[in-house]
Image: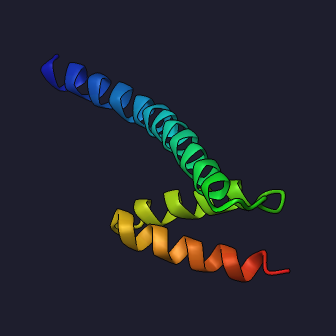
Amino acid sequence: MTTLLTAAVLGLLLVALPASAQEDETMIKRFCLAAFDAAMKQAGKTPPDGMGGSTCDCFIQQVNQGAGLDAAKQTCTAEAIKAFKS
């Protein structure tokens, strides 16, 4: 009985984790986009369409792969500059 209960609880946790991780990523992306917009506004620049989303998706991917926040920011800023260069 205990083994069955433990398996059921673990199963529920495994099902719940992706939703929680997705919610975390959604919240992080919102903060990232707000920071991106603020940085562009402070610089007096209008970013190309899609640049903020692409940069923030990159940031989340880098962090999920174990990069530190500063390293992820530097990597994704450099990638965005290359990808959206006029």
| Residue at point 59%, 48% (across, down) | 38
Q: Nearer the viewer, residue 18 or 38?
A: 38
Could you tell me which quadrant the N terminus lies in?
A: top left
Q: How many marks?
A: 0
| Residue at point 40%, 35% (across, down) | 17
Q: Position of residue 31 (x, y in %)?
A: 51, 42
Could you tell me which quadrant the C terminus lies in?
A: bottom right
| Residue at point 63%, 78% (across, down) | 79
* Vertical side of 73 occupied by 29: above or below: above
Q: How is the rendered protein coloured?
A: rainbow
Q: Quadrant of residue 34?
A: top right
Q: Position of residue 18 (x, y in %)?
A: 47, 38
Q: Position of residue 37 (x, y in %)?
A: 64, 49
Q: Position of residue 65 (x, y in %)?
A: 41, 67
Q: Quadrant of residue 63?
A: bottom left
In this rendering, would 83 be left or right of 14? right
* Vertical side of 62 occupied by 53: above or below: above
Farthest residue to the left: give it: 2
Q: Quadrant of residue 81?
A: bottom right
* Vertical side of 9 occupied by 54: above or below: below
| Residue at point 38%, 35% (across, down) | 14
* Vertical side of 3 occupied by 43: above or below: below
Q: Nearer the viewer, residue 60 or 71?
A: 71
Q: Nearer the viewer, residue 38 or 28?
A: 38
